[in-house]
Amino acid sequence: MKKTAVTASPILPVLAERWSPRAFNSAALPLSRIASALEAGRWAPSASNRQPWRIYAASKSDSPEGFAKLLSFLVPFNATWAAEASILIIGAAQIENDEGKPQPGALYDLGLYMGNFATQIAADGLYLHQMTGIDVDAATTGLDMPAGWQAVFAGAIGEFGDIAALPEKLAAREVEPRSRKPLSEIFFPQ
């Protein structure tokens, strides 16, 4: 299914075509299928080249136990549809450096990582739905993250699935046109 963005100015086709479905088909995908996306993220810009990001991942076909563990960190609403994805990820940021001082730029850097990651996923013909609806404390603790690290988001990855398999309200949202705020609400020339 295509949901091409209607843009005010031309953008790269991969960006115009990228969107975040909730309908996945549970195809067996190994983690190697996202290797290019992981590499694209690895080459994202990073302040002082700190690279304060980590990605925890599990493929349902390769590691059902790992997949179930990551799924358990999602809020129930997200877990209902994300269970059909092929791969789940949890993204984490080093929000404090090794001396315990805050690193506010870590979240920005993680966002840059995920921008690259999401674009590569789309270029590779897969879909990614990112979500912040997770139990941050449970994920941070359950994944044995080092001091100073924190879970930030989850992502469901896979091939597009059957919209009819979703609850009615979610199915309706899948077919709605994509939208964004107009530039006049987010861009302020000085």
Image (cartoon, grey):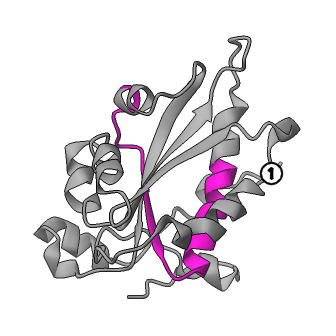
Q: What amino acid does circle 1 point to?
A: Pro
Residue 7 shows in this picture:
no
Residue 78 rendering spot, x and y as whole percentages? 27, 52
Q: Is 29 left or right of 50, judged from the image as shown?
A: left
Q: Is residue 46 above or below residue 82?
A: above
Give residue 138's position: percent from left, percent from top. Answer: 35, 29
Splitting the image into 4 quarters, where does residue 30 fall?
bottom left
Task: Please give the range of residues in magenta.
Answer: 111-137
Label 1 sits on a secondary structure element that is loop
**Is residue 120 part of the magenta span, yes or no?**
yes
* Closer to the camera in the image, 3 or 73: 73
Look at 48% across and 77% down and name the residue there: 126
At 74% from the left and 11% from the top, the residue drawn is 99
In the image, residue 55 sits, relative to residue 128, either above or below, namely above
| Residue 54, quarter of picture | top right
- From the viewer's perspective, is residue 40 above or below residue 130? below
